[in-house]
Image: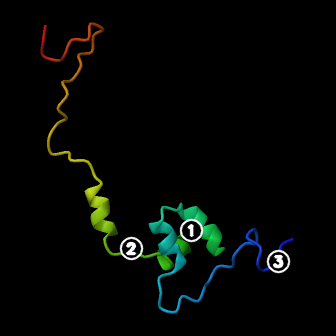
Amino acid sequence: MHGPQSSRAPRPVNRDFSGNLPPVSLLAASGVHPRVAQSLMRHSDINLTMSRYSHVLIGQESEAVAALPDLSEPPPQAAKATGTDHATAGTV
């Protein structure tokens, strides 16, 4: 039986944010795919969902930059030669 107390009943999306972050921002911060957020908000256009209802939260930009690999130095491993003898590049 699906009544108001049922855990299977879908919860309505709260569209009255009352000054709080919209749920799309919270979904994005939780790692939810943007198309899922679009579906939950019942938007026909992903641009509406992402440009109007999502925001970059404090700290997300610095976390994204910190997640980038360090490309200032080459990797410590030697490059393999193109032959089948498993020699490293620069040796004979």
Q: Earlier in the sequence, mark 2 or mark 3?
A: 3
Give the position of the N terminus as an image quadrant: bottom right
Local secondary structure at mark 2: loop
Local secondary structure at mark 3: loop
Of the residues shown, which amino acid type is indicated by label 1? Ile
Query: Disc count in the image?
Result: 3
Of the residues shown, which amino acid type is indicated by label 2? Val
Is residue 52 in view?
A: yes
Q: Which residue is mark 1?
A: 46
Rendering coords of residue 11 (x, y %):
69, 76
Towards the viewer: 50 or 6: 6
Question: CB under 8 Å between callouts 2 and 1?
Answer: no
Of the residues shown, which amino acid type is indicated by label 3? Gly
Q: Earlier in the sequence, mark 3 or mark 1?
A: 3
Residue 3 numbered mark, or none: 3
Question: CB under 8 Å between callouts 2 and 3?
Answer: no
2 or 1: mark nearer the eye:
2
Towards the viewer: 73 or 7: 7
Q: Residues within 10 Å of mark 3 (few under 14, many from 20)?
A: few
Rendering coords of residue 5 (x, y %):
76, 78
Q: Earlier in the sequence, mark 2 or mark 1?
A: 1
Q: Which residue is mark 2?
A: 56
Residue found 56% across the figure and 68% down from its top: 46
Residue found 62% across the figure and 83% down from its top: 14
Local secondary structure at mark 1: helix
Towards the viewer: 70 or 82: 70
Residue found 53% across the figure and 77% down from its top: 23
Indicate left or right for 21 with 64 as reference.
right
Q: Residues within 10 Å of mark 2 (few under 14, many from 20)?
A: few
Give the position of the C terminus as an image quadrant: top left
